Image (cartoon, helix red, strand yellow):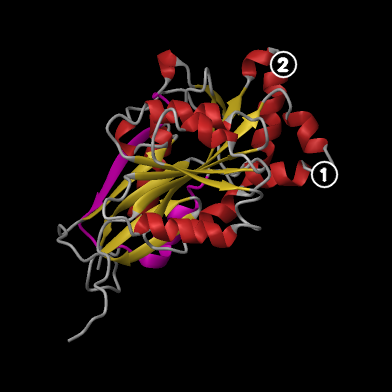
Amino acid sequence: MNDAAAPDVRPPIPLVVLGGYLGAGKTTLLNHVLSMAGQRKVAVLVNDFGDINIDAALIRERTDDVINLENGCICCSIGGRLVDVLVKISARPERPELLIIEASGVSDPVKIAQIGLLDRAFRLFGIIVAVDAERIGATLLDPYVGDIVRRQIEGATALVLTKTDLVTEQEKVEATEAVLALATTSILFEAVDGQIPPALIFDASVVPRHQAGGRGVMTAGASSLHRDISSFSFRSDFPLDRKKLRAALRGLSATLLRAKGIVWLDQDSLPQELHVAGGRILITPFAGHAAAESTLVLIGRFTGEDERAIRRCLESTQVLN
């Protein structure tokens, strides 16, 4: 008899990393996200820089599923503990529908995401970084922590400008320019009372696009909470060229939050499952039943012209003969 454990065929747990320097307002953002979760089962992993995890105590008011990691940078001094906790979460009989890791203010959220993805039980949905509009200029100039904050901004798939009520309009413009000069994404929101678009966290919340285009800060207040993140689908009856498809998706990093779908590639006899998030493109064999056509859903900050250009780019990956 073969006593080997059967492979876990459950779908991966979506993973969101929430980063940002000390005092940027991560916990306020996270509590707002949890207030939007509805009936979803959300687990939160909190790393605080100190012996007592204050953030976890604050977040526990919103969800019972909070795991603490104290004492240091989550991606270096306690990296092994993080892996152990992730293994335990993935092995639960009833897994959470989403895992959010709130990183300490002095950690690199990209490294945290990489640790999380060592276990295929998780799939990266995004790296969201909070930026303090009042202090960002001085923080970037600080010889001790400036590099840390720059890495946080550069690694984000979406950025949230916080504490804008404490600065003038000119100071907000300067903060926005400083952030976008470093960012590899153009998805930048101004959080009002901790509110961010649900689509940054929950795919089901994507709604039709807002027509304003261009790079700049988007206000995520109550009247425009969802409008700047949109989604559209792409379908093809022809197989797609793997290399061309990867190149096309890499070119969308500035406006793309996520992409996912089932595709047929010209060199494969089986359909492939495709996921894009955080600059990573994952293509793996799809074991389930798939339609004869390739289908992709793309989520991001798209204008009408963006969508048309992306469709043309994806169409160029088709193998027509």
Q: Mark 2: which secondary structure?
A: helix
For image coordinates 27% across by 59% down, the residue present is: 263
Q: In the image, is 155 to the left or to the right of 251?
A: right
Question: Which of the 4 image quadrants contains residue 7?
Answer: bottom left
Crowd rating for badge 2 (residues with CA inside 10 Å; few <14, some 14–19, many 20+): few
Residue occupied by mark 1: 144
Camera-side residue: 104 or 71?
71
283 in the magenta segment: no
The magenta stretch is: 226-253
**Of label 2 and label 1, which has the lower sequence position?**
1
Residue occupied by mark 2: 170
The alpha-carbon separation of the residues under discs 2 and 1 comes to 27 Å
Camera-side residue: 150 or 88?
88
For image coordinates 72% across by 16% down, the residue present is: 170
For image coordinates 32% across by 27% down, the residue present is: 208
Residue type for callout 2: Gln
